[in-house]
Structures are given as C-alpha cells and as structure tokens.
Amino acid sequence: MAKRLTREQKQNQAVIDLVNKMFEIAGHSVTYDDIKGRQDNWYQQWTMTEEQNKEWREWGIKYIKKEKRLLKSYADRQMAMFDLNYGLKIKQ
C-alpha cells in the first residue's frame, strides 16, 4: 500500500508541478531541479508571453482546485499569488 503524503509534502509537490508546467508552457527546457536552491531572481531570467501566462494560470487554477480541493475563487487567489512571487517575466 502506498504511503500518503503529508500536507507539507503535498505543498512541495504542488510548487514543483507549477514551476515545471510554467517552464513547459513558456517553451524553456528548464525544470524545478535546475532552479532549486537559487537565491537570486531566477524568474526574471526567462520570459513568457501574456497568452502563455494566461494558459499557465488557467492550468494552475484547475490543478490547485483538484489537489487542494478548494473553490475556484480560492484557487484563483492562490495562483495569482504564486504568479506574483514566482511567475516568469512577461514579454510584449
């Protein structure tokens, strides 16, 4: 029988999944493992378009709703905060 993840492990996995999907949608060959532990502003080194950002945020809201079992409004708020803190720079 598989061991259940703790709340902290689930949170860590969500961060990994969101970052990996962000880089995937933006078309960069970077993963969470490449940026893990960096103290600089790594999220400003790569860019994404507004359309890619919208696609990633929509995916993230669905992911957060499913994984954390939240209402859409709460998932939207959490995704907005994640994007604000760790989202890639938007290019015009």
Image: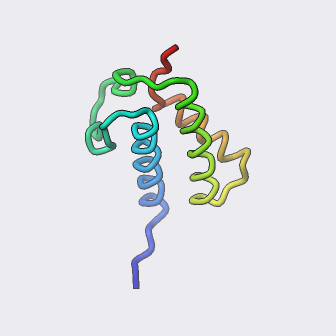
State the count of labels.
0
Q: Name the outermost residue toward the bottom.
A: 1
Could you tell whether 64 is left or right of 10 in the image?
Answer: right
Quadrant position of residue 39: top left
Q: Residue at x 44, y 32 (%)?
A: 26
Q: Residue at x 47, y 54 (%)?
A: 11
On the image, the x and y values in percent for residue 32 come to 33, 43
The quadrant of the image that shows the N terminus is bottom left
Q: How is the image coloured?
A: rainbow
Quadrant position of residue 58: top right
On the image, the x and y values in percent for residue 13 come to 42, 55
Quadrant position of residue 51: top right
| 10 w.r.t. 16: above or below | below
Residue situated in front as seen by the camera: 14 or 31: 31
| 49 w.r.t. 71: above or below | above
On the image, the x and y values in percent for residue 55 come to 57, 37
Q: Name the outermost residue toward the top.
A: 92
Q: Residue at x 59, y 58 (%)?
A: 68
Q: Residue at x 49, y 30 (%)?
A: 85
On the image, the x and y values in percent for residue 52 come to 53, 31
